[in-house]
Image (cartoon, grey):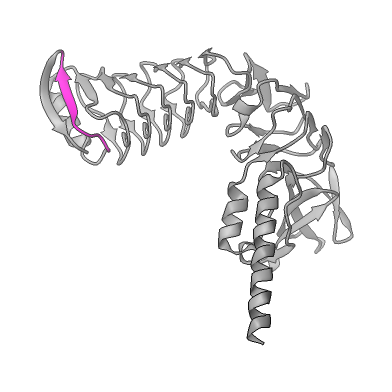
Amino acid sequence: MKKFIKTLVVFILSCILISTNCINSMAYHDLPYFKRHYGKGSNSHYNVKIDGIYYNILLYGKNKKGKEVYSVEATYAYANGKVLKIPNKIKFKGKKYKVQSVSFYEPAMDPEAFGAKLYEKITQWKFSLPYETIYLPKDATQFIWNRNTMKAPNFKKIYVGSKIKSFDLESSIYDMPKLKVIIDKKNPYIKIKNGAVYSKNGKKMYCLINSKKKYKIAKGTKSVNVGQNKILEKVILPSSVEKLSESAFSNCKKLKSVKLNKKLKVIKDFAFEKCKSLNRIVLPPNLDKIGLWAFKDCIKLSKVILEGEEKAPTIEKASFNNTKDGIKFFVKNQTVADQLKEQLNGSGVKDAKILIGKKVVYQNING
């Protein structure tokens, strides 16, 4: 009996190892899927797969006639082929529902069914999708592609309908150098301008589509999201940007130069995180706040120039984590120097110096 149990255990372990190796070696596949139903009543949440596409279906409640109202989101497609057409409607519980949004995530999976280690391995694995062209549903209002694990090296065209309000390719755009975004002319919400997706009124920049070494953000823009970009080296901000958006330039690893405008008041969380080529930044005179991890992992950042003459900006915890040791902060006067010294406490700097002109007024600052 003991021998039988031992043999059985070895067999099961072998199957798991073989399955894991298969997952690692496959370039493109349909991951194992577990149908799930969460919650009750108006919180009911379904994961289903229909014709090769995974959907999240959320029950909002019932309408005046007592019929259930669902929100439908397409989350991942595995079907082979160069063209992906996401349907306008799907059939669920015997009725048809509009597909209202498209979000490219990994398929819904159950960590309990996989086991924690294998589940983590799968979710960290790199996907390579074959699509050259994607057609979004005509009634969809949102499109998001925000997983680094999904690559689409052959992706050339995406057709966007008239109802899309939000368009986001920030995490993977740098792997789609040939991409063309074709937006329905009747779309009143977004537009293509100078190689980027902007809101129709021009106030919000969603992502930079075509990689360029130098990019000047359009006048009138208030909210900026360049998206991860492996080519961009220089950016110029217009005077209309008073608050630099969260993660605005995060992971732009070749970004060397950023011209911030004089009216900028806030640099939000993660704004320049992992900009590993950024070695110098000039902070405008009206800057009030630098957010959490704003310059984290800017490993070459060695020179920060503060133009303000009255006060130093508020600096959140870990804003300068993992910047270059001995980073130099240049200020206008002793008042700003004193305030900056206090603000650098907890900022993540190591052996930092504060200078007025060429004179070092504080040194060996560890935050």
Q: Based on the displayed image, in which of its 4 quarters is residue 68 positioned? A: bottom right
Q: Is 19 situated above or below 245?
A: below
Q: Is 240 situated above or below 52?
A: above
Q: Is 24 situated above or below 191?
A: below
Q: Position of residue 362 (x, y in %)?
A: 11, 27
235 or 185, nearer to the observer: 235
Residue lying farthest to the right in this orientation: 94
Residue lying farthest to the front in this orientation: 3
Q: Residue at x 27, y 38 (%)?
A: 348
Observer able to see residue 36? yes
Magenta-tinted stretch: 348-357
Q: Residue at x 74, y 62 (%)?
A: 35
Q: In screen coordinates, is 331 left or right of 173?
A: left
Q: In screen coordinates, is 175 left or right of 233?
A: right
Q: In screen coordinates, is 73 left or right of 98?
A: left
Q: Position of residue 175 (x, y in %)?
A: 63, 28
Q: Residue at x 77, y 57 (%)?
A: 48
Q: Position of residue 340 (x, y in %)?
A: 19, 30
Is residue 353 magenta-colored?
Answer: yes
Q: In screen coordinates, is 182 left or right of 211?
A: right
Q: Based on the displayed image, in which of its 4 quarters is residue 312 positioned? A: top left
Q: Residue at x 63, y 22 (%)?
A: 209
Observer able to see residue 43? no
